[in-house]
Amino acid sequence: MVDLNWAVLTAAFLMVLYMAQAGIVLTSVLHLANVRGGTWRAEVAPYAHATAYLFPLAFLLLLALLSSPELTFPYTGKSLHPSAWLHFPFLAAREIGMLLLVAGLSVAYVRASDRH
């Protein structure tokens, strides 16, 4: 059975991560759509860019989730022999690496769009 506190931590991680990415996606869509006839795009952009500051919190929540793999990934405590793709050290490295990649690209986009 899943510990309720761990389920809340998992939901909090996903919520913070999606909020961080949502602001970046919003400004990207507004930039691609090139909305004309209004200044609201420039007024919304700083607030949407501010969501990128949630990535460090998402990273800390991910580290908390990875600190106890038997609660996060139930198959790790079993005697099953998962494939190399699901082996915990490789899984954790992929999770951390991809979060850092997405956060880095998002911050690079915010910096590039702030210059214009």
Image (cartoon, rainbow, N blue to C red):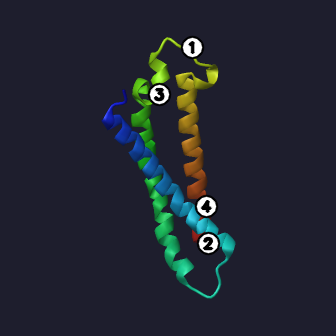
Query: Which residue bears the numbered disc 2?
Result: 30
Sequence-wise first label, 2 or 1: 2
- In whole angstroms, how far apart are the C-alphas of marks 4 and 1? 41 Å
- State the separation of the CA atoms marked 1 and 3: 13 Å
Q: Which residue is mark 1?
A: 81
Q: Earlier in the sequence, mark 2 or mark 4?
A: 2
User: Measured from the top left, where is residue 6 in percent x and y?
Assistant: 35, 35
Residue type highlighted by circle 3: Phe
Pointers 2 and 1 in contact (C-beta within 8 Å): no
- Nearest to N terminus: mark 4 or mark 1: 1
Task: Kindly report the distance in space between the C-alpha atoms of the residues bearing marks 2 and 4.
Answer: 13 Å
For mark 3, what is the residue?
A: 73
Q: How far across and how far down the image is residue 54, in percent?
A: 44, 54
State the residue lying farthest toward the bottom: 37
Q: Nearer the viewer, mark 4 or mark 3?
A: 3
Q: Nearer the viewer, residue 28 or 81?
A: 81
* 15 displayed left or right of 101: left
Label 3, label 2: how many angstroms apart (C-alpha)?
Answer: 38 Å
Residue at 56 percent of width and 66 percent of height: 26
For the residues marked 4 and 3, what is the alpha-carbon distance in whole angstroms? 33 Å
For label 4, the crowd category at 10 Å Cα-Cα, with few meaning under 14, some 14 to 19 and many 20 or more, is: some
Circle number at residue 110: none
Q: Which residue is mark 4?
A: 109
The residue positioned 58% from the left and 34% from the top of the image is: 94
Question: Could you classify mark 1 by the number of other residues whose Cα lies within 10 Å: few (under 14), some (14-19), or many (20 or more)?
Answer: few
For marks 2 and 1, give the CA distance: 47 Å
Give, as a three-letter code, the residue at label 4: Tyr
